């Protein structure tokens, strides 16, 4: 998730893009969301070349195609029936487990009829009467079924809704409902099952054996399914050209993707294409305002349609050909990322991720956004163009998904889940105060799910002019590393079952991880005396004053306050500022100009790898490579070290997985010793559902359950 460093050098040429066809219908009216009334689009499927053979050959092809469709439907029906039978068995086992006698059921009723605040004011008051509802509870009765509204509640809106730039775990879960990629991963409560790559819009995984990967590993040919459809009027097939458009949107100047660096380093011609595109931003063509939106969108579309990327080509409407700079063992993993989702031609009419775009998303997934009020609510409804047999990763059970924002208190969200007035938390974990009760009662609605992460970590703004540019001094950062009490942070997020102290940038479960602790303190509780001594040695005997913005959802305020106290003990004052506008990632941290102006000095973001498995580059490259600096980069602090970048390059180019892992480990050791950032915790995710949620399956990369797989009990 990283953006390359950009230099204002104009492109010397303007190669023709064979994927641009002026005969395609133009964009819809900016004021008419197609999800309500549809664009004036009467195009049908793109013509598919045939091999000849006359009428008989076409009849045979038609019969074979029909037979495949019937077999797909039969297989899906068998899978659906198997899921229903398993759900019934789970329901039976659950009922048998939960038969706790009259006293337990009466205790539940007393809890429900008592004061609402009793649900969230502490372990002592709660443990006595809040057991899992008995089998006669109406919210618990019945078997899973289709229909109903899944109610999701939480705090903040996503920083980016556009799949091209969406990078937070919340946006990943949301985008999965309406934006499909070539490949993906399955949701599962067994972590190992979520790692392998599976086809999504692609027909199959390319291999050397099936001809999808060339012998030299530099060319990938991907064949698309023919039944993935856009929610347009009339529905239109998702084509190879739509995927090419998706790649071309990654480096738009208005909302550049933080995942650009993965592709500029991997695909032929991507870096040159992006450098040319970013020149529009240098010329000031990047605004997204009511007056300039149309002109900006037109300029962006003209560049995209007039320039090609050598490494991403549509051979025909259902065949994509990728050409790589060098072999990449993780290339199929890159094609699972939401950034690479197909983009319909309608998106040419809007500035990427601008306010007009957000009202005109187009779906090729099981749900579509039919209502969006920024920072307030989303309403998703069934996409009528989506078909079960066309999607091997998603399902479509509930009729609606309602996401309600603005609820910053984890306790208030938990209260709604336990009362059954909401079903899932959007961005809030289970409150720490509720964890002992839920563990003791073995509440089946509660779970702790694995998703190795560096979350949170302390990032230093090396661009900040504050304190005489103190944070650019390596010795100052190393001094501050001794101040942190990680043991207190473990308690804040829920104890050792939920988190453990982390001292390396690369977390466990990630390629290149090796345990280390370059700044040890007794019991991981901090050493303020050593911090003061080293800070004085670095030239700051009177300490520092640091600006510290923090997120208001989840436990982030508590984490910020704990770090504030740790640093105060070291003689460092922090000015805490709550991010109530939801701009923490989207503007505060990822805008280099704000960093250079000293608007912040330290912050505590989190990082979940973009994928698991062969994922060495999914941590160090986006977080700390100097080649990723620029607008939208997730190298928030502006760190750059040539030796680190050289190790990253070697890790990316070696063909030996063991050698790559060693190179990632060595790079991690260097940035950790340099205190480029300060890892704090490797944290699991605590999740809770209402009593009526069934088939809740976890997506580690989204840190939540897959909305498309959930049933609601009758």
Image (cartoon, rainbow, N blue to C red):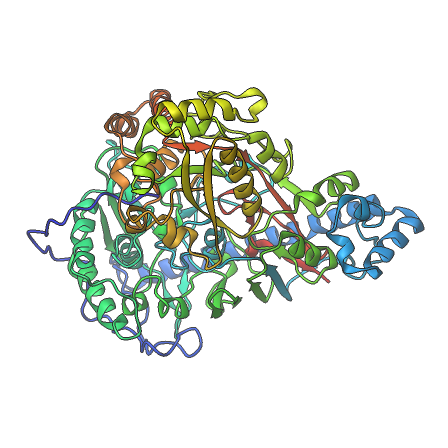
- Quadrant location of the C terminus? bottom right
Name the one closer to the observer, 234 or 540: 540
Residue 181 in view: no
Give the x, y percent position of residue 559. 55, 41
Image position of 383 (left or right of 42)? right
Judge whether 657 appears above or below 428 on screen.
Answer: above
Determine the residue located farthest toward the right in the rendered image: 102
150 or 675: which is nearer to us?
675
Q: Residue at x 78, y 47 (%)?
A: 94
Give the x, y percent position of residue 310. Answer: 18, 47
Q: Is residue 285 above or below residue 74?
A: below
Judge whether 696 appears above or below 329 on screen: below
Left/right placement of residue 400 relative to residue 135 reads left
- Residue 186 in sight from this viewpoint: yes
- Please name the residue shown 83% across and 46% down the image: 98
Q: Is residue 687 above or below residue 248?
A: above
Report the quarter where the N terminus lies.
Answer: top left
Specify whether 98 is left or right of 488: right
Q: Viewer-proximal residue, 485 or 391? A: 485
**Outermost residue toward the front in this view:** 542
Based on the displayed image, in which of its 4 quarters is residue 302 positioned?
A: bottom left
């Amino acid at each position: 998730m990283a953006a390359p460093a950009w230099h204002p050098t104009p492109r010397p040429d303007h190669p023709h893009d064979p994927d641009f066809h002026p005969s395609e219908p133009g964009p819809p009216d900016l004021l008419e969301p197609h999800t309500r009334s549809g664009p004036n689009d009467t195009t049908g499927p793109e013509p598919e070349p045939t091999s000849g053979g006359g009428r008989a050959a076409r009849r045979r092809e038609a019969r074979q195609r029909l037979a495949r469709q019937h077999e797909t439907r039969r297989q899906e029906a068998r899978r659906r029936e198997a899921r229903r039978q398993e759900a019934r068995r789970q329901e039976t086992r659950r009922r048998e487990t939960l038969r706790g006698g009259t006293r337990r059921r009466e205790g539940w009723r007393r809890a429900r009829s008592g004061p609402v605040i009793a649900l969230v004011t502490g372990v002592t008051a709660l443990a006595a009467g809040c057991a899992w509802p008995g089998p006669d509870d109406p919210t618990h009765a019945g078997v899973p079924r289709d229909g109903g509204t899944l109610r999701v509640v939480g705090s903040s809106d996503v920083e980016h809704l556009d799949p091209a730039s969406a990078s937070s775990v919340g946006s990943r879960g949301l985008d999965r409902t309406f934006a499909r990629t070539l490949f993906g991963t399955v949701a599962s409560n067994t972590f190992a099952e979520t790692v392998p790559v599976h086809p999504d819009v692609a027909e199959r995984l390319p291999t050397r054996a099936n001809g999808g990967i060339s012998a030299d590993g530099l060319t990938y040919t991907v064949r698309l399914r023919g039944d993935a459809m856009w929610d347009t009027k009339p529905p239109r097939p998702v084509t190879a050209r739509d995927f090419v458009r998706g790649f071309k949107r990654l480096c738009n100047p208005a909302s550049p993707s933080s995942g650009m660096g993965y592709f500029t380093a991997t695909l032929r011609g991507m870096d040159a294409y992006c450098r040319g595109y970013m020149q529009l931003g240098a010329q000031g063509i990047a605004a997204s305002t009511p007056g300039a939106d149309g002109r900006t969108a037109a300029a962006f579309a003209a560049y995209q349609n007039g320039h090609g990327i050598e490494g991403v080509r549509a051979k025909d409407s259902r065949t994509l050909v990728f050409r790589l700079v060098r072999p990449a063992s993780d290339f199929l993993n890159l094609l699972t990322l939401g950034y690479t989702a197909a983009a319909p031609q309608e998106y040419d009419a809007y500035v990427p991720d601008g306010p007009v775009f957000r009202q005109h998303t187009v779906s090729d997934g099981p749900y579509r956004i039919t209502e969006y009020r920024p920072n307030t609510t989303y309403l998703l409804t069934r996409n009528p163009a989506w078909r079960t047999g066309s999607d091997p990763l998603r399902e479509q059970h509930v009729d609606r998904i309602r996401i309600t924002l603005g609820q910053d208190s984890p306790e208030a969200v938990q209260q709604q889940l336990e009362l059954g007035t909401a079903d899932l938390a959007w961005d809030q974990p289970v409150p720490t105060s509720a964890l002992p009760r839920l563990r003791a009662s073995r509440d089946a609605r509660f779970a702790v799910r694995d998703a190795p992460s560096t979350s949170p970590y302390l990032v230093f703004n090396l661009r900040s002019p504050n304190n005489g540019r103190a944070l650019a001094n390596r010795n100052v950062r190393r001094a501050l590393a001794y101040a942190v009490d990680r043991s207190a942070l473990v308690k804040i997020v829920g104890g050792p079952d939920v988190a453990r102290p982390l001292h390396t940038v690369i977390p466990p479960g990630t390629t290149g991880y090796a345990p280390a602790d370059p700044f040890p303190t007794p019991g991981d509780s901090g050493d303020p005396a050593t911090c003061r001594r080293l800070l004085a040695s670095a030239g700051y005997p009177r300490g520092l004053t640091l600006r510290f913005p923090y997120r208001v959802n989840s436990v982030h305020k508590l984490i910020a306050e704990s770090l504030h106290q740790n640093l105060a003990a070291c003689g460092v004052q922090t000015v805490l500022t709550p991010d109530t506008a939801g701009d923490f990632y989207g503007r505060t941290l990822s805008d280099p100009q704000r960093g250079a102006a000293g608007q912040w000095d330290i912050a505590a973001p989190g990082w979940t790898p973009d994928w698991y498995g062969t994922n060495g580059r999914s941590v160090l490259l986006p977080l700390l490579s100097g080649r990723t600096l620029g607008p939208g980069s997730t190298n928030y602090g502006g760190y750059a070290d040539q030796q680190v970048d050289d190790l990253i390059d070697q890790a990316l180019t070696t063909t030996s997985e063991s050698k790559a892992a060693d190179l990632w480990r060595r790079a991690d050791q260097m940035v950790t010793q340099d205190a480029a950032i300060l890892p704090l915790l490797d944290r699991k995710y605590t999740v809770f559902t209402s009593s009526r949620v069934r088939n809740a399956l976890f997506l580690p990369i989204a840190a939540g359950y897959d909305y498309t797989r959930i049933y609601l009990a009758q």
